[in-house]
Image (cartoon, rainbow, N blue to C red):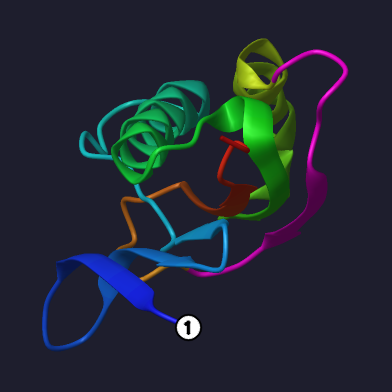
Amino acid sequence: MTIQYHHSNARMSQIAVHNGTVYLAGQVPSDATADMRGQTEQVLTRIDELLAEAGSSKEHLISAQIWVTDMAEFDQMNAAWEAWVVPGRPPVRAALEAKLAKPEWKVEIMVVAALPEA
């Protein structure tokens, strides 16, 4: 069983692929000046990019973990999420309020996806 790691440093990898499954590290926004919806859209774009690099896509999502810093902004995150997720194929999901590593970040999302069958 081979595990492939991509975009790795001494601390972590952004992508790990094992046994037909793609695991992404938690993704955060690149422009923290955006509002919750804007930050969420940035994160989802990055997830699309990383899944494509690994050979998968949001059509093959299995699960998602979402952390937001303020539940008062939860609806903004959900608006971006619902516009992005594939209709009829939503992954299992958990979302909770948490303090993130940088105070300017409003959202972090981590997903697991399957590789499409050849």
Q: Nearer the viewer, residue 95 or 2?
A: 2
The kind of residue tagged 1 is Met
- Label 1 secondary element: loop
Specify few, some or many for label 1: CA neighbours under 10 Å numbering under 14, 14-19, or 20 or more: few
Q: Position of residue 45 (x, y in %)?
A: 38, 26
In this picture, is 11 found above or below 29? below
Q: Residue at x 26, y 39 (%)?
A: 32
On whether residue 11 falls in the magenta region, the answer is: no
Side of 1 relative to 97 (left or right): left
Query: Which residue is pictured at 73% across the width and 48% down the height?
Result: 62
Between 41 and 113, the one lying in front of the other is: 113
Closer-to-camera residue (68/56): 56
State the residue lying farthest toward the left: 9
- Most extreme residue toward the front is 118
- Can residue 43 be seen from the camera position used here? yes
Where residue 91 appears, as percent x and y from the top left, is 79, 41
- Residue at image position (73%, 60%) is 96
- Is residue 77 visible to the viewer in this orientation of the structure? no
**From which residue to which does the magenta span run?**
86-99
Residue underneath mark 1: 1
Location of the C terminus by quadrant is top right
In the depicted view, which residue is nearer to us: 15 or 77? 15
In the displayed structure, 52 sits above or below 67; it is above
* Res. 15 image quadrant: bottom left
Q: Position of residue 16 (x, y in %)?
A: 39, 67
Is 56 situated left or right of 61 in this image? left
Q: Position of residue 115 (x, y in %)?
A: 56, 45
Whether 95 is among the magenta residues is yes
Task: Name the image quarter holding residue 85.
Answer: top right
> Above or below — where is 76 with respect to 61?
above
